[in-house]
Image: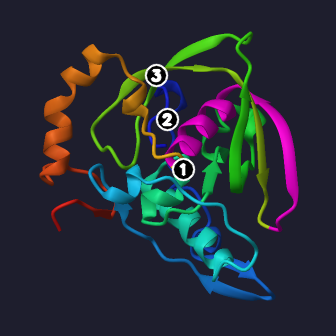
Amino acid sequence: MRSVPPSFCATTSSRKESDIYNNHLNNHFIEAVILPIYIYGQPVLRNESLDIDANYPDLKELIANMFETLTASEGVGLAAPQIGKNIRLAVIDLDVLSDDLPEYKDFRKAFINPHIIEYDENSEKKTMEEGCLSLPGIHENVTRPTRIHVKYMDEDFNAHDEWVEGYLARVMQHEFDHLDATMFIDRLSPLRKQLIKSKLKALLQGRYRCSYRTKPVRK
């Protein structure tokens, strides 16, 4: 997830170089790699992702690379299909919003095998503008529940079963949608889908601009 409401917008340029380039793993440092973001039209974005186990190869390195890619893209969330892998893995970094949302200070977390178990239909539904690293240049209002029940595993494969609310619940819904082959544009009204049709066509043709590495359909 890239776009946030204008008052929430933040960059990550203030991060320490050691936080950006080096990640501690098994008593040694690895140098994380910035991966290309797969753009709308890539088949991997429309395939459902599978659960993984602790034997998945080089998982720690992959998570480090996803965080590095997220930082370089100035986003707040990234799902594995967006870097070409149909596995149930997502990373979220809300620390970049902590000046406006102090409750998310130091919130930087990986989610393995996440599933939304239940939406609290009695909670308030909220409409906010969203964007996506895989849909550069497209920003639309999306209505979502503000409280959800999720299950996932952390980087050490400890199980979590939680009710989540607020802005984190929105980002989770956006990122976990990717794991189910859904993008935020699928949640728009028929009219709004029609109005962005030319923008989607441009993405398919590789006609877009963004400041981060990408993997377009035709290259």
Query: Where does residue 148 sit, x and y in percent of width and height?
Result: 73, 28
Instruction: Quote the CA–CA distance across marks 2 and 1.
Output: 25 Å
- Residue that appears at 82% across and 65% down: 157
- Image-based side of 197 in relation to 185, left or right: left
Residue named by callout 3:
142
At label 3, counting other C-alpha atoms closer than 10 Å, the crowd grade (few under 14, some 14-19, many 20 or more) is some
Amino acid on which the number 2 mark rests in the picture:
Cys
Q: How is the image coloured?
A: rainbow
At label 2, counting other C-alpha atoms closer than 10 Å, the crowd grade (few under 14, some 14-19, many 20 or more) is some
Secondary structure category for the residue under label 2: loop
- Residue that appears at 53% across and 53% down: 78
Instruction: Quote the CA–CA distance across marks 3 and 1.
Output: 18 Å
Q: Image height check: is 212 above or below 95? A: below
Secondary structure category for the residue under label 1: helix
Instruction: Quote the CA–CA distance across marks 3 and 2.
Output: 17 Å
CB within 8 Å, label 3 to label 1? no
Residue named by callout 2:
9
Query: Where does residue 69 sit, x and y in percent of width and height?
Result: 48, 64
- Residue that appears at 73% across and 39% down: 104
- Image-based side of 5 in relation to 38, left or right: right
At label 1, counting other C-alpha atoms closer than 10 Å, the crowd grade (few under 14, some 14-19, many 20 or more) is many
Q: Image height check: is 122 above or below 49? A: above
Q: Nearer the viewer, mark 2 or mark 1?
A: 1
Residue 167 within the magenta-colored segment of the rendering: yes
Residue named by callout 1:
179
Q: Image height check: is 109 above or below 34? A: above
Amino acid on which the number 3 mark rests in the picture:
Val
- Residue that appears at 36% across and 25% down: 140
Bounds of the magenta segment: 156-178
